[in-house]
Every structure is written in C-alpha cells, then in structure tokens.
Amino acid sequence: MTEELFSTDAYARTCEATVTDAGADGVVLDRTVFYARSGGQPGDTGWLTWGSGTARVTDTFKKDGTLRHAIEGDPPPLGTRVTAEIDWDRRHTYMRTHTALHALSGIVWRHYGAKVTGGSMDLGVARMDFELPSMSAEFGRAVEEKLNEALGQDRPVYVSFVPRAEALADPDLIRTKVNLIPEHVDPIRVIDIEGVDKQADGGTHVRSTAEVGRIRVVKTESKGKDFKRMRIELVDR
Ligand SMILES: [Zn+2]
C-alpha cells in the first residue's frame, strides 16, 4: 500500500520514494504527495526525478485500489529511489476551489436548508447542484455575499479521522449521507470548516478560508424540478 502523505499534509509538495511497480498502468510508489483523482478533485500532475532521469506525471488515479502515477516517457526502473514533486500552483488552486465548494454547500444548507445533489470542479471554477425549487440571479448574489463574508472571517479548516460509529452519529455528517461510505472505511476522514461546513471527504484543502480568497457566482440555472445549478469561480486564479 502507498502511504498517502497528502491525506494528512496537503501542503507537502515533494517527497523521496521508492518505485514498487512500473508498468503500462503507471508508476506505483511506496509513498507519495500526489493526490489521486476522486470526489470531484482531479489527480495531481508533476514530476518524478532520479539519477539522470526525469518523467512528467500527467495524472494520478487509483485502479483496483492502487494509487498510480501516469507518466510520459520511460518509467524509472523498479526499486529506483525517486523524488516526487507535484505541480504546486495547480494543486493549490484546486485546494482553494475545493474548500470554496465545501463552504458553498454549508452556506446554502445553513441559510436555505437545501441539500447538495452533485458537483464538480476545474481549475479555479466549479459547479454545485442543489435540491431547490427555484434559483434566481438575486439568490446567487445573496449566496455570493454570505459566502465571501464567511471566507473573509479566516476560519480554520481541520482535517480529522473520526471513528465510524462516531461519524454516523454526528448530525452534520448525517446530512451529507456519511452512512453511504463503504462499511470497511473506519476511521472516516472529515473536513471541518469551523462553523461553516463539515463533511466526510478525501480531498486536499487549504488550512484557512482566507486562503481561498473571494469567489464570484457566475451563473445560476435550472436543470429541472428541485435541480438547480450554481457556478462559481475564484476571483483571483
Ligand atoms: Zn469535497
């Protein structure tokens, strides 16, 4: 199993590691700072370097539970000691985008009682779907104001590992359907944006909401009954 350093330290940009597999499916390391795409957050890109060799990592993903680095060119041989380094500017923008999305879901829940039904993110832009009967441009402006106010309060973002039984009994986590997480997952990783949003999540986040900066609601649209979509972007991206 690969030790996933990003899970406890989202700010780790580089690490030393050993190649434990290198085939057509990509390079496997004993430890890594590369986040594997899931939960709407894309996989990291970056570089592996060793001796006189270097390879560009074009994506990171999991296949059959194993974390794999997709690379361009020849992989380092099995057993090689490599330096793994992520494209930090790109990753940090994803961290800001991801934390902004969680804060958005918390704001819309707390002020309007609406549940999230879906979402996705790209570099500095994201969309989120809500179970709402209507969504106007005016609603978008009101949410934007509340969200920016919360982000500007510089609230800490905590990562913790909560025993499954405790997570299943937490009202904040029940709202986000924590019971749907496969039974073997224990403890459950939880992201808590203090006073704004709390949910089970495997992604990488910034350590405080001020680091997200300001966001802008760029579009509100109806995709059907109780299916309304909001698009946001980071003002500074
Ligand atoms: Zn998330």
Image: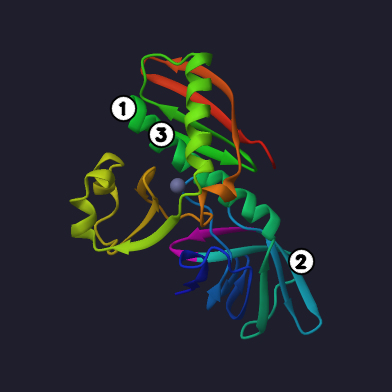
Relative depth, front residue between 45 and 220: 220
Query: Residue at the spot x=28%, y=48% of the render?
Result: 178
Name the quarter where the C terminus is drawn: top right
Which mark is drawn over residue 134? Answer: none
Q: Which residue is mark 3?
A: 107
Q: Which residue is mark 2?
A: 73
Report crowding for label 1: few under 14, some 14 to 19, many 20 or more residues within 10 A (C-alpha). Answer: few
Query: Residue at the spot x=53%, y=78% of the render?
Result: 30
Name the side, left or right, on which 1 lies relative to 195: right
Query: Residue at the spot x=23%, y=59% of the render?
Result: 164
* Amino acid type of the residue that numbered disc 1 sits on in the rendered structure: Gly
Disc 3 to disc 1, C-alpha distance: 9 Å
Looking at the image, is mark 1 or mark 2 nearer the viewer? 1
Disc 1 to disc 2, C-alpha distance: 50 Å
Disc 3 to disc 2, C-alpha distance: 45 Å
Mark 2: secondary structure = loop
Q: Earlier in the sequence, mark 3 or mark 2?
A: 2
Q: Which residue is mark 1?
A: 113
Report crowding for label 3: few under 14, some 14 to 19, many 20 or more residues within 10 A (C-alpha). Answer: many
The location of residue 13, given as percent across then percent down, is: 63, 68
Relative depth, front residue between 122 and 79: 122
Overall secondary structure of the magenta stretch?
strand
Query: Residue at the spot x=47%, y=30% of the render?
Result: 146
Instruction: Say how many tags the image has.
Output: 3
Report crowding for label 2: few under 14, some 14 to 19, many 20 or more residues within 10 A (C-alpha). Answer: few
* Amino acid type of the residue that numbered disc 2 sits on in the rendered structure: Gly
